[in-house]
Image (cartoon, grey):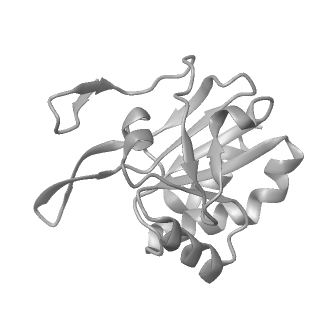
Amino acid sequence: MSYDHGEGKCFEMLETGIKAPLFTLPDQNGKMHSLDEYRGKKVILYFYPKDNTPGCTRQACGYTAHLPQFEEKGAVVLGISKDSVESHKRFEEKHGLKFTLLSDENLETIKAYDVWKEKKSFGKTYMGVVRTTYLIDEDGMIVKSNDKVKAAEDAEKMMEEF
């Protein structure tokens, strides 16, 4: 299935078994992170629509609660949205989040991972981030993808993968 991202370009859903697109993005403290630096670890890469909203807060708090178990399994958690570094910092501090939040204000990584899509809400159509989680293995390959994420259950569902 392909999607038009509003620029006349169609992208296929990222499937398992392909190399995860590389990125370099700033975290909530302004430090740059690239996917390459996590080679040798499993990466739970989740994309979410907006900081400090009910669903996104439940999802992030779920990952914080399960972080020790993920770390025991050699996995890191990275959350990405189009929110600013400053917004991510407020989100982290307000909810005591314990993992890295990455800012993709220019949407390059969001589009590379095929999560910028047409959405509908209250009869209005707009472009936005579709809540999506990818599991990337130690070699940088996508081994699991889910674009039907239930925010409150996402961290627990990912625990089942280990």
Q: Position of residue 140 (x, y in %)?
A: 66, 25
Vertical placement of residue 69 versus 83, above or below: above
Q: In the figure, is residue 93 to the left or right of 73?
A: left
Visible in this render: residue 125? Answer: yes
Q: Quadrant of residue 98?
A: bottom right
Which one is nearer the viewer's eye here, 128 or 16? 128
Q: Position of residue 104 (x, y in %)?
A: 45, 52
Q: Position of residue 3 (x, y in %)?
A: 24, 31
Which one is nearer the viewer's eye here, 160 or 56? 56
In which quadrant is the N terminus drawn?
top left
* Residue at the outermost right position: 72
Q: Quadrant of residue 9?
A: top left
Q: In the figure, is residue 106 to the left or right of 15?
A: left
Q: Position of residue 121 (x, y in %)?
A: 20, 62
Vertical placement of residue 13 versus 160, above or below: above
Q: In the figure, is residue 139 to the left or right of 152?
A: right
Vertical placement of residue 126 versus 44, above or below: below
* Residue at the outermost left position: 123
